[in-house]
Amino acid sequence: MTTIKNILISLLLLLSTSFCFAQSNIYLEIAGTGGLGSINYEKIYKPENNLSYSLRTGFSMAPIDKNNGVALIFPVMFNGIYGQNKHKLEFGLGQSFTLSTKASFFIMGISNLGYRLEPDDKKYFFRLTYTPIISYLIDFQWQHWAGISIGYKL
C-alpha cells in the first residue's frame, strides 16, 4: 500500500509544480532509466540564464523472470539542462519505482549525464545519455547503463 502511495505522491508533486513550467515534452527512450525502453513526459522550467530545470516521469514494462513476472517501471527525475544554443548538457538524479505483476516492489536510484540536441526552431529533440542505475537498499550496486531518446516538444 505504501508503494502505491509513494508513486502517487511523486506524481502529485510533479503535477502540482507544473504551473511554473514553460515547456512540455514527450519522448521515447531506448534503454536508459526505464530499463529496456520507456515513454516519458517532461516539464521544463526556463529561467533567464543558460540553466533550465526539468521534472520528468516515465513508464516502462520489462519481463523479469517466472517468479517475479513483468516489471512496471516508473522513473521520476529532476534534471538540469545547461546550454544556450541547440547543443546542451543534461544531468539529473531521481528514483525508479518498480512494481512486478507478482507484487514485488523495488526502488532504485537513477541518474543521467549526457548530450541533448534541441534546436529552438524545431519541434523535435534528441538525447544521448549515460544513465547508471544505483541499487542501495540491501547491497550497494552501480550498474552502467545508457540511453538514446527522440522527443517532441508539445
Image (spheres, rainbow, N blue to C red):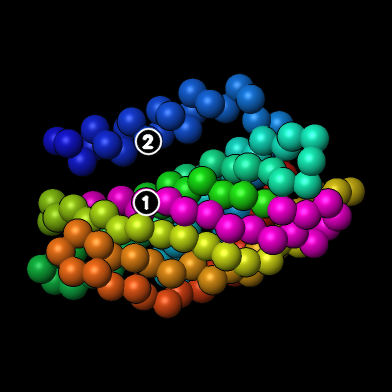
Badge 1 element: strand
Q: In this orientation, does residue 112 appear? A: yes
Along the line of sight, which residue is nearer the eye, 25 or 115? Answer: 115
Mark 1 and mark 2 residues within 8 Å of each other at the beta carbon: yes
Return the x and y of residue 6 as percentages of the image width and height: 27, 36
Which residue is pictured at 46% across the width and 60% down the height? Answer: 111
| Residue 137 falls within the magenta-colored stretch | no
Q: Which label sits on residue 95?
A: 1
Query: As displayed, is residue 45 above or below residue 30?
Result: above
What's under tag 1, amino acid-wise?
A: Gln
Judge left or right: residue 143 versus residue 99.
Answer: right
Judge left or right: residue 9 versus residue 101.
Answer: right
Q: Quadrant of residue 128?
A: bottom right
Whichever of labels 1 and 2 marks the residue nearer the N terminus, that label is 2
Which residue is pictured at 19% across the width and 59% down the height? Answer: 137
Q: CA distance from mark 1 to mark 2?
A: 10 Å
Residue behind mark 2? 10
Which residue is pictured at 33% across the width and 31% down the height? Answer: 9
What's under tag 2, amino acid-wise?
A: Ser
Along the line of sight, which residue is nearer the eye, 17 or 61? Answer: 17
Q: Main secondary structure of the magenta part?
A: strand
Q: Quadrant of residue 100?
A: bottom left
Q: Which label sits on residue 21?
A: none
Which residue is pictured at 34% across the width and 73% down the height? Answer: 142
Judge left or right: residue 142 versus residue 28.
Answer: left
Badge 2 element: helix
Return the x and y of residue 46 as percentages of the image width and height: 73, 37
Return the x and y of residue 75 as percentages of the image width and height: 41, 52
* First to last magenta residue range: 82-100
Q: Residues within 10 Å of mark 2 (few under 14, many from 20)?
A: some
